[in-house]
């Protein structure tokens, strides 16, 4: 192949959206509102059906209680001032008022309890679904995308409270609508004109809350990268992994400055929105106060002229306050629901994500490896904007063979491993497992056939046994297999000296209970010890068809490296393995060595053949070997050595 495979042109530089585009986006968001709100409510109902039903009934019932209390107050006042009302009737009205108060108190606290229960049930369900979706992503592309990570952060926030906020907002809206209807009806009986005036004064509040809610959601999205950087700097300043370099290099103040700069940027943006919110709310409150005050003056004058009774004044004041409060509540619930739904969209986007890599509906069977793995004209780049990482790579790893990949940093070695584990698919070309294209097999099935020790291995804040057991969950509680893997990796002796041996927590992030029941501090291993533990995790998968070893001894001292290399040689005997290492002395015994440069295979063969060819491999080998040669022999030493 003479050139790169064709591909669709990548997107150009992002342009600032026009006013029309922003309006189109807003209209699209509004059109999705009913559908997403319905999804949120359905999810809330599914999380705890009985609790949800009780919460709905109590919320709606309490909407009518203030209206009932206002009318009972009016009737009682009229009965007292106008005469002709029996004592029994007045006592009945008073008892009714007391009953409304009791019911309101009981239902309020009961409803708060049901709401808390519902929110916990929703959080459990949505978090489970969110991370089921995240765990379902086959590859790594989304986890290497800052935009996706921002969306995932917002989805996590929304999943915990979003559906509950939507449900509470819509129920609160229904409750407020009942109150508004009741008080507007009461007010209409007294004065249709005042009813229209009070209703019109509430419309600006609704519009303003909707506008502010859109701005709050947009601010959440815009500040995502800034807030993630702030968290990043905070972690650097507070974790043991970074503590040594932060103190040795004296960069604590520098990192703190960057953290506070990001915090100030986020705070300034939030303060601007808060000021805008305060101004709008103050204006709306002033309008409400003017309408209410004017209405009271009208009611007093009407009562003086005999058009209203004392009870009418009482219900008028209650109705005006109730309508204004309910309309404000309506605006708040609409805005809150709108904001919650827009954030909930991020959750829905994640759980409804299309597969990041295509998975065959009927995967091809993946046989046990009998022939080998073939890279056939593999080209790869991470996106259309990125350069090619691999350029027509072709080689074959035969069954039972140990193949080593060597080359400078950036030559494509680690990318080949990602493709082999199907974390990505080749942009062009194919990877074949006994002739079967990896695109056509179940990725989970493929990965059960592969054992690996990665250069960027994980150090889990768990016990030593659990750290090893994660390599094969079928052996998670098999102490004998875990110990065997540790022995082969040369870490058993160290783990046996720990306070609780294999049950010792390898972290200081969480407390550990000592054997006498007291709180104790976990143990932190050295870098080389952690690498041995990661290697033990890989050895636990020793029955797999293929072992991938990516710089398995890079963090070890010379003696430990020699021990590990001997263990690896024993392990590789008769097995299919792929070895990546910058230390060329550790790969010289591989059956085949493939040399990569700038994403291409430039040489392949055994160590002796490549050294005889005097090419790139020989040059790199000689360069490394020169570091171990004595460049400066003192006079007389060499002569003495001959004697």
Image: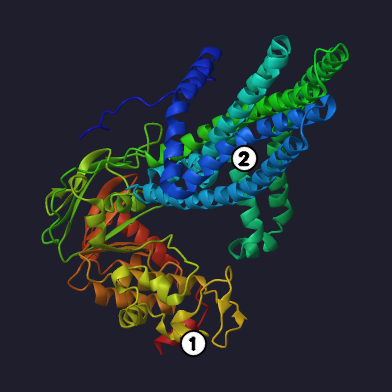
Q: Secondary structure at mark 2?
A: helix
Rendering coords of residue 96 (x, y %): 69, 39
How far apart, in angstroms, are the residues tagged by discs 1 and 2? 45 Å
Quarter-of-image position of residue 213 = top right
Vertical position of residue 76 compared to residue 605: above or below: above
Q: Mark 2, residues whose alpha carbon is within 10 Å: few (<14), some, or many (≥20)?
A: some
The quarter of the rendered structure image containing the N terminus is top left
Which of the numbered marks, if any, corresponds to residue 497? 1
Rendering coords of residue 445 (x, y %): 22, 56
Q: Earlier in the sequence, mark 1 or mark 2?
A: 2
Color theme of the render: rainbow
At a point 68% along the width and 43% down the height, the residue shown is 99
Left or right of 223, for residue 529: left
The answer to whether any part of residue 630 appears in the image is: no
Q: Which residue is mark 2?
A: 226
At a point 50% along the width and 68% down the height, the residue shown is 461
At a point 68% along the width and 38% down the height, the residue shown is 266
Rendering coords of residue 181 (x, y %): 61, 23
Left or right of 84, for residue 58: left
Quarter-of-image position of residue 189 = top right
Q: Secondary structure at mark 1?
A: loop
Most foreground residue, 445 or 381: 445
Vertical position of residue 458 compared to residue 438: above or below: below
Most foreground residue, 406 or 398: 398
The answer to whether any part of residue 278 appears in the image is: yes
Which of the numbered marks, if any, corresponds to residue 369? none
Rendering coords of residue 39 (x, y %): 42, 36
Quarter-of-image position of residue 570 = bottom left
Most foreground residue, 629 or 509: 509
The quarter of the rendered structure image containing the C terminus is bottom left
């Amino acid at each position: 192949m003479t050139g790169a495979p064709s591909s669709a042109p990548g997107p150009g530089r992002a342009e600032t959206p026009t006013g029309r585009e922003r309006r189109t986006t807003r209209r699209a968001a509004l059109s999705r509102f009913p559908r997403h709100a319905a999804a949120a409510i359905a999810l809330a109902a599914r999380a705890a059906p009985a609790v949800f039903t009780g919460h709905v009934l109590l919320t709606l019932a309490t909407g009518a209680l203030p209206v009932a209390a206002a009318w009972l107050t009016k009737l009682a006042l009229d009965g007292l001032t106008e005469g002709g009302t029996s004592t029994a009737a007045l006592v009945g009205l008073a008892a009714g008022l007391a009953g409304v108060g009791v019911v309101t108190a009981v239902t309020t606290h009961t409803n708060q309890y049901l709401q808390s229960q519902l929110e916990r049930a929703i959080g459990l369900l949505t978090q489970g679904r969110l991370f089921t979706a995240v765990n379902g992503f086959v590859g790594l592309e989304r986890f290497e995308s800052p935009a996706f990570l921002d969306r995932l952060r917002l989805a996590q926030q929304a999943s915990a409270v979003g559906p509950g906020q939507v449900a509470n907002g819509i129920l609160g809206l229904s409750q407020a609508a009942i109150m508004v209807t009741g008080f507007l009806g009461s007010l209409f009986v007294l004065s249709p004109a005042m009813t229209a005036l009070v209703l019109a004064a509430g419309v600006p509040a609704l519009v303003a809350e909707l506008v502010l809610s859109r701005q709050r959601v947009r601010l959440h999205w815009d500040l995502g990268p800034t807030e993630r950087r702030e968290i990043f700097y905070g972690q650097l300043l507070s974790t043991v992994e970074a503590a040594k370099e932060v103190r040795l290099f004296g960069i604590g103040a520098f990192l703190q400055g960057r953290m506070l700069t990001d915090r100030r940027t986020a705070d300034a943006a939030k303060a601007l929105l808060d000021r805008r919110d305060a101004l709008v709310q103050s204006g709306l409150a002033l309008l409400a106060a003017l309408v209410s005050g004017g209405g009271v003056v009208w009611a007093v004058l009407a009562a003086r002229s005999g058009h209203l009774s004392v009870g009418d004044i009482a219900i008028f004041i209650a109705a005006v306050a109730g309508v204004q409060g309910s309309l404000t509540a309506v605006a708040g619930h609409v805005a809150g629901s709108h904001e919650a739904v827009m954030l909930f969209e991020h959750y829905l986007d994640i759980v409804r994500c299309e597969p990041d890599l295509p998975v065959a509906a009927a995967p091809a069977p993946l046989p046990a490896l009998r022939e080998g793995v073939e890279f056939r004209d593999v080209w790869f780049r991470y996106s259309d904007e990125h350069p090619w990482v691999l350029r027509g790579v072709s080689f074959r790893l035969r069954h039972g063979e140990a193949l080593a990949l060597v080359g400078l940093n950036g030559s494509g070695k680690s990318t080949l491993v990602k493709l082999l584990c199907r974390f990505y698919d080749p942009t062009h070309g194919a990877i074949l497992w006994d002739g079967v294209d990896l695109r056509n097999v179940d990725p989970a099935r493929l990965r059960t056939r592969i054992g690996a020790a990665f250069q960027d291995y994980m150090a889990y804040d768990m016990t030593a046994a659990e750290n090893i057991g994660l390599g094969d969950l079928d052996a998670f509680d098999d102490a004998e297999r875990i110990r065997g893997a540790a022995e082969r990796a040369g870490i058993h002796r160290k783990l046996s000296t720990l306070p609780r041996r294999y049950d010792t927590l390898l972290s200081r992030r969480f407390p550990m209970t000592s054997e006498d029941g007291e709180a104790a501090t976990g143990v932190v291993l050295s870098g080389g010890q952690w690498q041995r533990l990661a290697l033990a995790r890989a050895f636990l998968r020793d029955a797999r068809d293929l072992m991938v070893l990516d710089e398995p001894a890079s963090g070890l001292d010379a003696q430990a490296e020699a021990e590990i290399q001997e263990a690896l040689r024993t392990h590789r005997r008769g097995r299919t393995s792929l070895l990546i290492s910058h230390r060329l002395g550790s790969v010289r015994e591989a059956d085949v060595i493939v040399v990569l440069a700038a994403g291409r295979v430039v040489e392949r063969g055994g160590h002796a053949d490549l050294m005889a060819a005097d090419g790139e491999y020989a040059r790199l080998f000689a360069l490394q070997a020169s570091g171990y040669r004595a460049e400066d022999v003192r006079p007389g030493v060499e002569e003495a050595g001959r004697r």
